[in-house]
Image: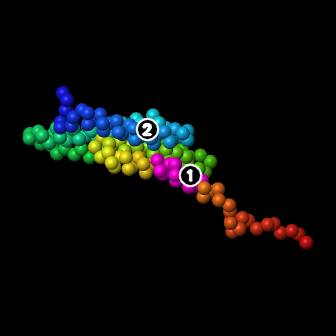
Amino acid sequence: MGVLHNLPWYEVTLRLGIALAFAAVIGWERERKARPAGLRTNMLVALGASTFTVISIAMFEQFMADPGQSQPVDPTRIIAGIVGGIGFLGAGAIMQGRQRVHGMTTAAGIWVVAAVGVASGAGYYLIAGVCMVMAVFTLIVVRWAEGAMNASPKTKRDTPPPPHSPE
């Protein structure tokens, strides 16, 4: 069996492979910063999302080809499930402590990697690639810019006035 309902196996492999590769780029950046969702987590999220997307496309083609099918088939329901499930997974990465919330970027990154997986699984390689580039830009360049802005010298308005000396 060389075809999965009009989708050749080499195309399925390409879709899953691109999701894995693009997620590896994002995951590598997270791994470098020793974040909770690193290389393997990001790769697995994208691979799973891509696989579910390919399955939903195949199921849509399979059931649309069946003239006796009485129930409407909506492949976007699987993608909606991915979005909800990834939100739940991302919520587990968020922690609160000492008046600070940690893990928001990790959670958002997992969500974006799932989108890369869905786009790859659907065969939208350009969208997946652009999303991956923008995610890496956000994680690296924007972090650098934030650090540069936070390290800038304070203005006189930001510093408290000197204490008054008693006379």
Q: Residues within 10 Å of mark 2 (few under 14, many from 20)?
A: many
Residue type beneath disc 1? Trp
Percent position (x, y) of residue 15?
30, 38
State the SS at label 1. helix
Which residue is disc 2 drawn over? Answer: 24
Q: Would you place residue 55 above or below residue 102 in this image?
A: above
For residue 118, what is the image quadrant? top left
Q: Can you name the residue that lies furthest to the top here? A: 1
Is 123 or 78 nearer to us in this picture? Answer: 123
Q: Is residue 144 visible?
A: yes
Q: Residue at x 45, y 34 (%)?
A: 40
| First in residue order: circle 2 vs circle 1 | 2
Percent position (x, y) of residue 33?
55, 41
Residue type beneath disc 2? Ala
The stretch in magenta equals 136-147
Which residue is disc 1 drawn over? Answer: 144
Q: Residue at x 41, y 46 (%)?
A: 132
State the SS at label 2. helix
